Structures are given as structure tokens and as C-alpha cells.
Amino acid sequence: MIVDRKDLKAALPRRARLMGLDLGEKTIGLALSDTGLMIASPYETLKRTKFTLDAKVLLEKAAKEGVGGLVLGLPLNMDGSEGPRCQSVKQFARNLAELTDLPITYQDERMSTIAVTRTLIEADRSRKRRKDLVDKMAASYILQGALDFLQNH
């Protein structure tokens, strides 16, 4: 079920974690929250294949980690409008919602990859290492934004 961000907390089981997703064309970055819904941590980067296989892997990982809800990064345009990539993320969410009872919501992901890349450059990570880390760190950035929203609303 797709829910508004402000309704996510009420839809979560007690002490459940959230999983953040940064949906790219070739990869899906994953992040997990703690059970107190305070801190997001990078988890894993998956190579994308077909939706059915991607969904199966995601839902298996969610079940293994005690995830009670999903937060998908929504790639809004800088002016806040939705472009083709938003439609792709929303279609992924609708298809995923048919396979699970987990609540799914969106979090604005504008600037997440840029912010994470800047952080990695400042940490003097090599280009190859940045490539390995950026997707799951972007998912963590997205998830932390949602967690901060939940704490303040």
C-alpha cells in the first residue's frame, strides 16, 4: 500500500525498521534504519535486472532485516515538478505494492547523489570506491530525510 509520508509511522508495526531505496537505472541503493527510526545506515547496492527478480530480492532482504516499510527516493526536478524518472519510480512502487503489504512512501531525493558524492570526495575516496558506495549512501541520505520528517511531524 502506498501511503503519504505523514501517515507512514501509523502504518508501521512497533519496533520495525524502514528500508530506503535509491532507484537508479542500473542499480538500487538500499539503506536501513534502526528500530527506533532515528538513524539511517547504508546497507547494500543491488544490480537491477527484471522487476520481478528485483522485487523478490528486495522483499526477501526486507523480511530478513525486520523491515516494516519502504521509503523510495522520488527524483523531482529542481522546481519541484515531476519528470519521467518520477513516473518510473511511481510505477515501480505501484508494482511492488501489488506484491507486499508493506507501506510504501516517497521522499524527495533532489541533490542526494550530489551531496553524497561531495562527501565522498571530501573523504578522499577514489573514483572506483565512490562508484561502489554512492548508491547505498544516497539511499541512506534519502532514508535519513524521511526519518527526520517522522521525528518532526
Image: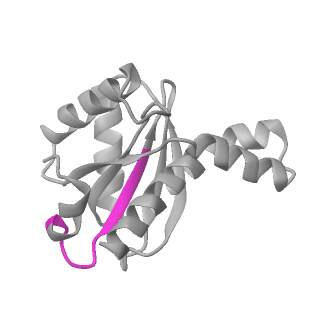
Residue 144: where, in percent of width, then height? 47, 62
Q: Is residue 84 above or below residue 100?
A: above
Q: Is residue 56 above or below residue 116?
A: above
Q: Along the horizontal axis of the image, is 53 left or right of 126? A: left
Q: Residue at x 48, y 31 (%)?
A: 24
Q: Nearer the viewer, residue 56 or 126?
A: 126
Q: Along the horizontal axis of the image, is 92 left or right of 147? A: left
Q: Is residue 14 magenta?
A: yes
Residue 133 seen in the figure = no
Residue 149: where, in percent of width, then height? 37, 66
Q: Is residue 16 above or below residue 144?
A: below
Q: According to the image, what is the colour scheme of the structure?
A: one colour
Residue at far top of view: 84
Q: Which residues are magenta?
A: 11-21
Quarter of the picture containing the C terminus is bottom left
Q: Is residue 121 above or below residue 77?
A: below
Q: Residue at x 47, y 56 (%)?
A: 31
Residue 135: where, in percent of width, then height? 57, 42
Residue at far front of view: 79
Residue 152: where, in percent of width, then height? 36, 74
Image label count: 0
Residue 131 seen in the figure = yes
Q: Quadrant of residue 53?
A: top left
Q: Along the horizontal axis of the image, is 4 left or right of 58? A: left
Q: Is residue 69 magenta?
A: no
Q: Residue at x 87, y 51 (%)?
A: 124
